[in-house]
Image: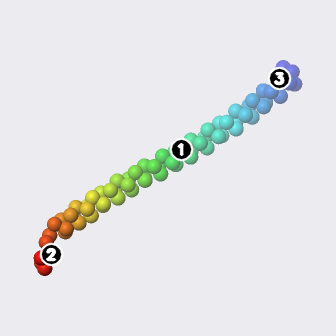
Amino acid sequence: MSDEEQKRLEELEIKLVYQEDLIQTLNSVMSEQQQQLLELREICRLLNAKIESFSSQNTAYQQEIPPHY
């Protein structure tokens, strides 16, 4: 193998190592974001349930006629 070929091979190996590291980093970031997304969905579900609960309480309250009417 010539020096030129050896140098090209080493450069390709270096690029491969950097790409593998980048893929691992991206995978880690995506995993964290997926966990955050799941947590946010759960928070939204709980908030929607609270809003519905308050709405139903408010509707029941509004349907009562105040004593001065």
Q: Is residue 16 above or below residue 45?
A: above
Residue 44 image position (x, y, % from top left): 38, 55
**Mark 1 vs mark 3, CA separation in Å:** 37 Å
Image spot of residue 19 (x, y percent): 67, 36
Give the residue type that dot 2 points to.
Pro
Q: At 19% across and 68% down in the image, what residue appears? A: 62
Apparent side of residue 8 relative to residue 59 in the rendered image (left or right): right
Q: Are marks 2 and 1 in contact (CB under 8 Å)?
A: no
Image coords of residue 61 (percent x, y): 19, 68
Residue located 83% across and 28% down the image: 7
Quarter of the image that includes the N terminus: top right
In the rendered view, tell whether residue 1 sits above or below residue 32: above
Q: Count neighbours of disc 3 (C-alpha within 10 A) and say few if under 14, some if 14 to 19, many if 20 or more.
A: few
SS at badge 3 = helix
Choose the circle earlier in sequence order: 2 or 3: 3
Pointer 3 residue: 5
Mark 2 highlights which residue?
A: 66
CB atoms of marks 2 and 3 within 8 Å: no
Callout in the foreground (2, 1): 2
For disc 1, the marked residue is 30
Q: Quadrant of residue 55?
A: bottom left
Q: Amino acid at mark 3?
A: Glu
Do residues under tags 1 and 3 come within 8 Å of each other at their CB atoms? no
Q: Quadrant of the C terminus?
A: bottom left
